[in-house]
Image (cartoon, coloured by chain):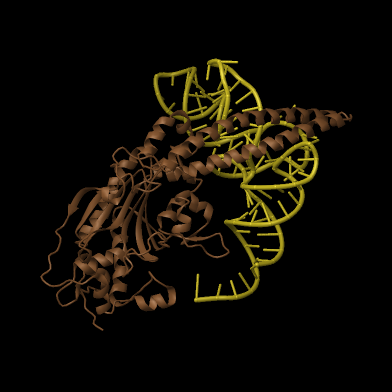
Amino acid sequence: MLDIKLIRENPELVKNNLAKRGIPEAIQMLGDLIAVDKEWRLNLTKLNELRHQRKQVTIEIAKLKKAGKEAASEVERAQGIDEKITLLEKQVTEQEQKTHDYLMQLPNLLDESVPLGKDANDNVQIKTWGTIPKFNFPIKNHIDLALDLDQIDIERAGKISGARFFYLKNQVAQLDMALISFAIEELTKKGYTPIIPPYLMKREAYEGVTALGDFADVLYKAENEDLYLIATSEHPMAAMFMNEVLKEQDMPLKLAGISTCFRKEAGAHGKDTRGIFRTHQFNKVEQFIFCKPEDSAKLHEELLQNAEELLQKLELPHRVVNVCTGDIGTVAAKKYDIEAWMPAQNGYREVVSCSNCTDYQARRLGIRYREKEGAPPKGFVHTLNSTAIATGRTIVAILENNQQQDGTINIPKALRKYMGNLEKIDRKR
RNA sequence: GCCGGGAUGGCAGAGUGGUUAACGCGCGGGCCUUGAGAGCCCGUGGACCUUCUGGUCCGCAUGGGUUCGAAUCCCAUUCCCGGCGCCA
């Protein structure tokens, strides 16, 4: 959510920034918002005057009654004012609702360093790491590799749950857990607190962390309950301190969330249909930071570096892109993606998303900070999030990059200690 | 799930239908002091208007209701505590 005061005081700045996203509806909304807000303030002043009048009459009545006198005409006057108040209150409430709706829909302001662009094709490559593997044999994709080694069962998952679900089996099931353990151990060393959050969240909390459009396209809802399955542990971590005031000395607060993630993938028909690259359910370790505004840019780089380091320890070739204005999403002010090399697709694909959400989520959620106990709140915190390891896509990358001519797969050295020193995935049917 | 108790500022905690959220702690500023502390004084939720001096309204878990008037009475919801039940 943007600061309404900033919008009032500096509408041009906000407008020009929003214009970079290339969403005409947002500019329209901003105009409507400014108009409604102006009307609302006028009405509020009128309403306050009426309430003041009523209060005066009420005081009169109290005095008269205390003195044991008749107050019928005063009561009648108060009732008359009440009617006007009820009418105006309705208008004011409607205007407040509208203002709130607009504010909840307007996206975050973009950082200056975000490149202009239309879609993912315009993302700017910042760096590459590792060498793309050369194979002197015909390579397989991750699905065939896994099927041939009896590591995955997609057909039966389809039977019981539908498309985009899977059973992981054997060493790949272990690999999934190893990746989690590996990420958590590495992040814990860096001072991140491991968190296993609730996997279901109430709507009110969820509205604070994400765009409203995501509810239909992304989130699964529990029937007859005000509960949504989380799409990432970013969400329960961000909402953790909803309506609280954090202490400056406790920041930056660094968390490492561990959870299964559930996504409808409603807008992705026909994309990545085979295998486990894009699924309704996967496991992920997520980095999350609450910090002071002045620290967020620096910490954003730290999150990126942590994520990259994990991929480097897994020896996975990858590149980092600066996500452009057309592809960045509603809540981020700046976003990096890390894309790992996927041999069977002969290209880089997203495995990490690393965002600085500045004060956008914090304002929606009401998360502020104070200098010390007893001092008044100083302002809203900044929030940042970044994938550490998403197991599904990382497994795809490991299987494809580490495949051998005989169809077996070498397990990255960094993961072996989490798998009983296993070196290869080689189980045949 | 059932029965009972509860939710008031950053914290602790009064107020139980009639203008005012008491007292305290903490925090900020000032006086005093060589400095710190103590002591004393002022301030310390949010919004809107404003002639920059102030003014008004809202705020006692949330949403409704009763009333001229609600922190206070009624209803619903959420969460917390205790007891019972169920349960991996």
Chain A, chosen colour in render: brown
**Residue at the limit of the structure toward the left, as seen here:** A136
Give the answer, above or below, for where A276 lies relative to A228: below
Q: Nearer the viewer, residue A85 or A298?
A: A85
Residue A245 in view, yes or no: no
Residue A190 in view, yes or no: yes
Residue at position x 17%, y 71% in the image: A139
Left or right? Give the position of A291 relative to A66: left
| Residue B62 percent across, percent down from the top left | 62, 47
Residue at position x 36%, y 73% in the image: A166
Quadrant of the drawing holding the C terminus of chain A: bottom left
Q: Disc count in the image?
A: 0
Left or right? Give the position of A90 relative to A144: right
| Residue B48 percent across, percent down from the top left | 57, 29
| Residue A198 percent across, percent down from the top left | 47, 60
Give the answer, above or below, for where A363 lies relative to A225: above
| Residue A237 percent across, percent down from the top left | 43, 54
Residue at position x 16%, y 57% in the image: A130
Q: Nearer the viewer, residue A31 or B26?
A: A31
Residue at position x 71%, y 38% in the image: A86
Left or right? Give the position of B85 relative to A70: left
Which chain gets the yellow colouring? B
Picture quarter containing residue B51? top right
